[in-house]
Image (spheres, rainbow, N blue to C red):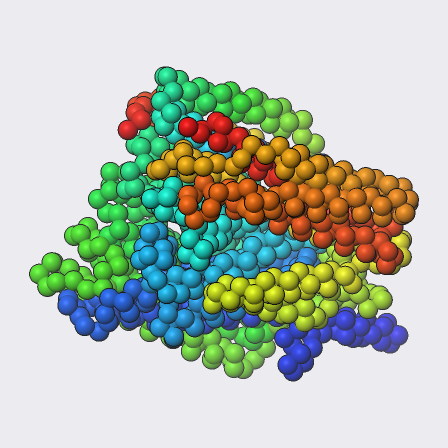
Amino acid sequence: MTSDRSEADRIRGLETIWAPPKGWRALSAVNHSIVGRRFMVTAFAFFLFGGVLAMLIRAQLALPGNAFMGPEAYSQVFTMHGTVMMFLFAIPIIEGFAIYMLPKMLGARDLAFPRLSAFAYWCYLFGGLIVVGSLLLGMAPNSGWFMYTPLSSSTYTPGINADVWLIGVTFVEVSAVAAGVEFMATILKVRTAGMALNRMPLMAWYLWVTAAMIVFGFPPLILGSILLEIERAFDWPFFDPTRGGDPLLWQHLFWLFGHPEVYIIFLPAAGIISTVLPVLARHPIVGYTWIVVAVVGLGFISFGLWVHHMFTTGIPNLALSFFSAASLLVVLPTSVQFFAWLATLLKGRPEMHLPMLFIYGFFFTFVIGGLTGVMVAVVPFDWQVHDTHFVVAHFHYVLIGGQIFPALAAAYYWLPHFTGRRMTQTLGKVVFWLILIGFTLTFLPMHLTGLLGMPRRIYTYAEGAGWEALNLTSSIGGFILAIGFALFVVDMLLQLRTPGKAVRNPWRTGGLEWAMDTPPPSYNIASLPWVRSRLPGNDSPDLAGELAEGRGLLATPRNGWRETLAVDMIDGQPDQIVLLPGPTWIPLYTALATGTFFVGLLVKIYVVAVLGALAVLACGLVWVWDSGLKEDPERLDIGCGATALPHPAATMPPSLWGLVFLLASNGALFASLVFGTLFLWTVAPNWPPPATLPADVLSRVVTLAGLALALGGALRALRVGGRGRDGARQVWLVVATLGGLIAAAGFAAVPAVLTPPMSGHAYAAVTAFAGAYMAFHAFLGAVFTAYAFARGRAGWLSAVRTVEVRAAVIWWIYTAAAGLVTLALIHLMPVLAGP
Amino acid sequence: MREAEGFGVLVAMIAGFLLWTSAFVALYAVFSLACIYDWPAPRLFVVGVWLVHLIAHGALVAWTLRWWRARPADPADPRPFLRLAAVTIAIAALGATVWTGLPAVLSFSCS
């Protein structure tokens, strides 16, 4: 009786601590299940919107000479279709799925940074609304989803259509990078005890590689979008060949993002296959290690393919052959996964449930898309079909086959987890056949339409071209496909009302996400398991019951803390107790401030943009102020005879890993800037520039001295602070702050004083931009060290609580390294490659 | 296991493809620079870069093989998995670099 009461108290305590607020205050919730669901529902709404645009396209192309839409409306519709599907659906649906499912699969109670995922959601929503809203106002982007210059430059696209794309999409990309950082840190550290790397669910490997690809793949496009927006707004000619710019630079930056993007979309879908297929085949996945190797390989090689979108731009043949070789190479890791899946099917006893039907649909469609991918990887073939409907058919086979079919399999597989209700499969089978038939009718004939020479993006065509029957077939197929998706929506709504509670773990799998009640409680699991295999549920038939009874780790709530575990990244031994934040409005406020910044840029009222940026900075400081502890903690009991330190006293808590990954992403942006600068110096027309920076020794010495003071001061502060010399630590933090301000001033002098007029030549533009980039980083570094100083004064720092100082050191290591490269770039290039 | 050591193990695991990335970037960059600036015997530079990377790949394969052979026998230990993955990635990346750079050996032209 007493035991029952204490168990009830424990559960009530967990519910109180983790419960999201009700009513309109629910918007301040940061629980991963809520944020994940919001992401997925919003992404699906955008998917339906993009689907309607697709129907408009097919209605227009159904007949030759169709006057349903004019060229301007058609340009906006196809641009928005691609933009919505790629940026507002394909990536965010993955993010939503990962935010919802990842902690459950890892046996954690939440992600490493719940407020960051909430912030990512609001950024995504606001950015998406900017992009979609523009269509309703008739000002939608109209230069195609890859926004090639010079078409998207202000000369050929006046008005704000292109600005909407550049600013709206960048806003959404901020969200994606935030999610990427979140996933990398979470998978690395926030797992349950015993979950060594070799015991991680395959989905975690897939999502870690995907997150890394987001972190490294999105920055080139973010940089490209910033440069193009600056060109459009201030006439800095990065892409104007008459003034030393080059439109090909945009293509490089876009496709450096754009091709990995395809694999960013595919890999989580492949993760779904690797998770669901073994369960329904009733056999553990064959070749776990091989799949991990293949996924890592795919992540790398996918970055070596970007020029295969540029085979017709006049790049020398041998360079093309490097990229063609890499494009063919990528087949191998993909095939490894296919053979592993086939082997699992062969060794198992597959059960033909509804999710399996969609998996077979994936096999059928994606293999065709993969084979046509091999065809367009071969340069001479690509020259024939470039920018024809063959390519449109190919990438829809890859994207719909590679993501939508697995996503539908996932939707039905995890439906009982979301709803907690018993699932019916009848209507889902009709959905499957309608989608498969509709998809095949739409896109299979499109290969022929393309081979017959029909270019993509033309709003109509003349009768007699031989494309009529094929286009009509595609349009009929498109509407069948749309009916299939409409029926899917109906089915999902009906499933929400299905009578009968789902049995726990309906698919009889050992995955941790099923070792909890469905729908899951706000705290996921009442206690965390200590796992000893990849499928812990198979080791203990009543694992869910044991965990619910508190026979795991962190079972008893304490101090009102939201607790989960951080582990050694390799062997999974418990390492820290991560104290997570509760409901807060700060992510929403920060996203609103970010939105103010972007809208200020969009409407070109720059005072508003500056105020928005300052508000973002202020929100950021408020965000982190109440994190941490004011007293040195001791090791605390976590259950099962183990203890761990609360994360504020750890040397490398997840937050610092998050900073490392954020700076890695920032480094990718900086590397793209270095690449762009070298590209312009070596390849662009009208170089060398008419004027370069003056040989000014003073600014270089001052800048270098500032960097040295900042980095040295931060390092020294960490050293003396770790010995308990609080006063000395504060002094060195002041030194670091002053050094940061000096370095910022030195770098700011480049665009403010030293550079020739920026609109005159791309050299001046790119040099000024590099100087501004570094000034911004040095200024932020000064703010961080000043913040650490303030935290020290307020009693948040001690000899063991040093997170803020460590963060400042990491920031200054990056900034000093990037600063040295920048100084070399802007001062040595005129000497090395000048006249 | 200490954090830096753990991260080092992860880096060692993917070292093969880090080397492939280096080879790929170097091949493209050296080819472009050699042709743009009319370096004498541009093929020599490109193939040279490729061969240097192949040597590094070979050394990495040898090192990861040794590392794998010294793995602990405990099946619960994650190190055998990580070291096997490191060897496999090192070998796969060696093949990838051979394949990617082969066009420079077979047929070279700046046009």
For the residue pair A78 and A692, the one nearer the viewer reads as: A692
Q: Nearer the viewer, residue A45 or A65?
A: A65
Q: Is residue A225 above or below residue A500?
A: above
Q: Position of residue A559 (x, y in %)?
A: 85, 66
Is A578 in front, or is A131? Answer: A131
Observer able to see residue A740: yes
In the orientation shown, which residue stands out farthest toward the left?
A464
Q: Residue at x 64, y 62 (%)?
A: A614
For residue A502, above or below residue A368: below
Locate residue A789, reporting x and y percent: 81, 52
Which of the 4 quarters of the picture holds residue A354?
A: bottom left
- Count of all numbered marks drawn on residues in the image: 0
Above or below: residue A526 compared with residue B71? below
Q: Position of residue A357 (x, y in %)?
A: 40, 62
Percent across and percent down for residue A202 are 56, 50
Instruction: Answer left or right for A731 relative to A164.
Output: right
Looking at the rendering, which quadrant does residue A686 occupy? top left
Q: Can residue B3 be spotted in the picture?
A: no
Relative placement, left or right, of A610 versus A557 is: left
Q: What is the quadrant of the N terminus of chain A in the image?
A: bottom right
Q: Quadrant of the C terminus of chain A?
A: top left
Q: Is residue A548 left or right of residue A250?
A: right
Q: Is residue A737 left or right of residue B51?
A: right
Q: Residue at x 79, y 44 (%)?
A: A735
Q: Residue at x 37, y 70 (%)?
A: A139
- Which residue is rendered at x = 65% and y = 82% of the image? A23
